Amino acid sequence: MRTNQPKTIYLSEYRVPAYLVDTVDLRFELFEDGARVHSTLSVRRNPESEAGAVPLELDGDSLKLESVSLDGVPLAQGQFEDQGDRLVVSQVPESFELTVVTWIEPQNNTRLEGLYKSSGMFCTQCEAEGFRCITFFPDRPDVMSRFRTRIEADSKSYPVLLSNGNDVERGDLPDGRHFVTWEDPFPKPCYLFALVAGDLVEKRDSFKTCSGRDIDLRMYVEPRNAEKCDHAMDSLKRSMRWDEEVYGREYDLDIFMIVAVDDFNMGAMENKGLNIFNSSCVLASQETATDLAFQRIEAIVAHEYFHNWSGNRVTCRDWFQLSLKEGFTVFRDSCFSADTGSPTVKRIEDVTLLRTAQFAEDAGPMAHPVRPSSYMEISNFYTLTIYEKGAEVVRMIHILLGPEMFRKGSDLYFERHDGQAVTTDDFLQAMEDASGRDLSQFRRWYEQAGTPVLEVSDEFDANACVYRLSIRQQIPDTPGQTNKQPQHIPFALGLLGNRGQALPLRLVAGEVDAPAERVLELTETEHTFEFHGIDEHPVPSLLRDFSAPVRVRYPWSREQLLFLMSHDPDGFNRWDAGQRLAVDVIQELVGASKDVAVDPRLVTAYGHLVSDASLDQALVAKMLQLPSEAYLIELADAADAPAIHAARERVVKHLAIALRDELVACYRRNAESEAYQVTPEQIARRSLRNTALSWLLLINDEEGRELAVRQFRDADNMTDRMGALRALVNSDYEDERDRVLSEFYTRFQDDPQVIEQWFSVQAASDRAGSLPQIRALLEHEAFDWKNPNKVRSVIGAFAGQNLAEFHRADGSGYDFLAEQVCRLDDSNPQIAARLVTPLTRWKKFAPAYGERMKAGLELIRDKSGLSRDVYEVVHKSLA
Ligand code: TYR
């Protein structure tokens, strides 16, 4: 399991499996001190393999082998070899039955891969390579088998026994034990296997599919969470309907189950018919979950459900193809969320994440293509590039083909590859075949890493009434990749006249009925487009709705940005103009003396947003959120995080002082009580009032303080209670801060999901999250090193959000993170490897910081027995 020089795996070395496994018969005997797994595989030589009569090799990890038999005959020593991470059976016939018995210790499994225990229940996580921690198996997604699973356990402690498919048999056993047998009729790769055993309550509902079949929907949670299932259940039913209506995809089993577990490395997992969720990504109630959590839950429930087709029915051939299922499924869940809420707001949220975190990844040492060509540890490749950039790539195909052809393409893809394990190329081929479009150049989006930069320049020829736009694309070098070829980029744009009118885009002189918006297709390094019949210098609105995951450089003046902020018909670009303006103003102040003033035009623009209730309030709520520190760092060269933090805070304070009365009025306008609902309108109102509150508290406004204290006390929902808490925690009112933090804790101490929020609001705060305070949180009774959510809510929030403290000039923040990574590496390498991320960006920062960050990485590198996960991240970052 531990190694100091992990092997690199290459896509070019892919070979079809030498053996296939048609059926898997599993029997789990679950006990408190371990579990015995009996596995019987029907194996046959793969007719498509050229390997011939080679030994059978099965993957394993941390298994204690008890016995092996072939066609019912026990194998003797010498007929097989247990190499620890591999079981090799040297002489096997063309087809045979292999039975392997292993002993594992779920109760000691802190990696949370394979079978483990969480709050007293047994659960599994097999993606990507966790099944090999359960039994010896060809643990690769292109081996698809039909599973039958019998689970045996104590009836009292584990009344609920679940696995994939349908329950076909159950009964009692001696010694107070019982069993249930599950059968999944659909062949699947072992990464989709799941098992749950626990004392859980069941919530039931049902769904009638488009063809009239009744599906039994069940959620299983710990008794204390019984009242927190409604939102997920409702999201599930809406997802099921949406996938029928938008993609023509019907659910295929008779039962669909969701289980919530507290200890989980990721968000959730799409195991066939038995999705397992991190509690924080599925449980919600008005009192305990914020609007953001409600939206996240809806998106993740949809995501896992959509995987039933994009991932399970059609799966990945190998892990290099991960974006085949993840990019496509993120695109699907993102469209679903857009359809249920505000499309513009959803787009803004997606792009914010992409530009802040994925662009940073793409510019850092771990940069990789959407389809990587090598890895050491696949767990490190569940990245923003695979997920979010992968989704953007599918979105571009949608733009290029249009909705109808795209649907034809997805129909063909599902039909052609149902039951198969395929590649991103197969996906593109289906899109090409259905639409007749040539996507050969487009394939480079999958092969080339790095964020393309588009330099845009223009020229207005008043005499000829021609406006010329030149666009040059350039793709930066990334580790192992230089001299990249131009990519195929859909570039949506419009042109605005002086009065804000949309100008017709005539690509040839005299064109009639020319549209006011076009999607230009960039394929060359440089293009020049001529727009005819233009009689004034227009203001260009570029890359509308963020039609491609690229950086656009165009020298907009601040006047032009203000103009776009109020006139651009594209809501996304209206928001983006505001962001660009704010970025420009803040950047001017970074490291500048106090004599440099905050541009008064920003105050005017924000004053307008705060006061004009006739504007789209959901969009306004987003526009009032100034660019984050993380985004400003991403945009900077030789970033100085504390200086960026100070400049940004100076701007917020300046706006808050100038707009103080407007903010109070905005708060009051949006504060009248109404029955809590998670609708776009209400979300916007809560967001506006909480933004107003946080700004007022930043300037120690007495009325603001009173409003916050009252809101904290009277709130009937977590969004408002947390909004008030956060505002107070980030204020200089120390007494109030301590008081509300302790009141909050007392009230919610029995609810781990809420306590996670309580941890992170402190860890992310430059007021409550100094290093000694962070260390104190790690000692807190509610902190638990074995629970990834707790680790993320303190250490992750500190290093990822509390940037002024994390980047202290003395390097103490970096050393602290290095120390925690080393500690976690022994118990949970996946989580440890993810926590390293902030340090990997050391080259982005001014040398005074960067050198200290690098020293932090070296500390980790020198730890003995480093996991493969952390090894890969650290070594690539230091290379
Ligand atoms: N496939 C999961 C998803 O839907 C992600 C996941 C990956 C979950 C690996 C757990 C895990 O260990 O996004």
Image (tube, grey):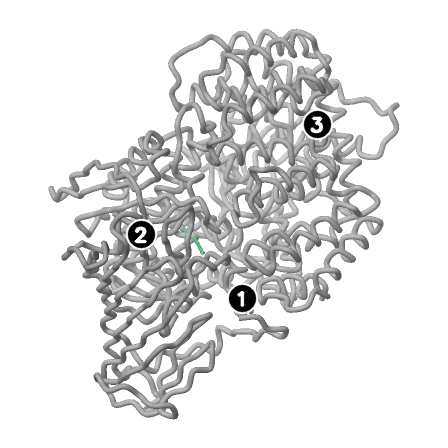
Quarter-of-image position of residue 243:
top left
The residue carrying pointer 2 sits among few (fewer than 14), some (14 to 19) or many (20 or more) residues within 10 Å by Cα, namely many
Label 1, label 2: how far apart the Cα atoms are: 29 Å
Q: Are marks 1 and 2 in contact (CB under 8 Å)?
A: no
- Foreground residue, 783 or 433? 783
Label 3's element?
Answer: helix
Considering only order in the chain, which callout, 2 or 1, is on the residue closer to the N terminus? 2
Report the amino acid beneath label 3: Arg
* Dot label at residue 197: 2
Q: Which percent across, then down, holds residue 16?
A: 36, 78
Up-down: is 594 above or below 366?
Answer: above
Up-down: is 259 above or below 293?
Answer: below
Label 3, label 2: how far apart the Cα atoms are: 60 Å
Label 1's element?
Answer: loop
* Whether residue 533 can be seen here: no
Up-down: is 559 above or below 402?
Answer: above
The residue carrying pointer 1 sits among few (fewer than 14), some (14 to 19) or many (20 or more) residues within 10 Å by Cα, namely many
Label 3, label 1: how far apart the Cα atoms are: 46 Å
> Which residue carries the number 1 mark?
377
663 sits left or right of 177 in the view: right
- Foreground residue, 860 or 538? 860
The residue that appears at 61% across and 24% down in the rendered structure is 741
The residue that appears at 83% across and 51% down in the rendered structure is 847
> Which residue carries the number 3 mark?
558
Report the amino acid beneath label 2: Ala
Report the amino acid beneath label 1: Glu
* Dot label at residue 421: none
Number of numbered discs on residues:
3
529 sits left or right of 318 in the view: right
Quarter-of-image position of residue 464:
top right
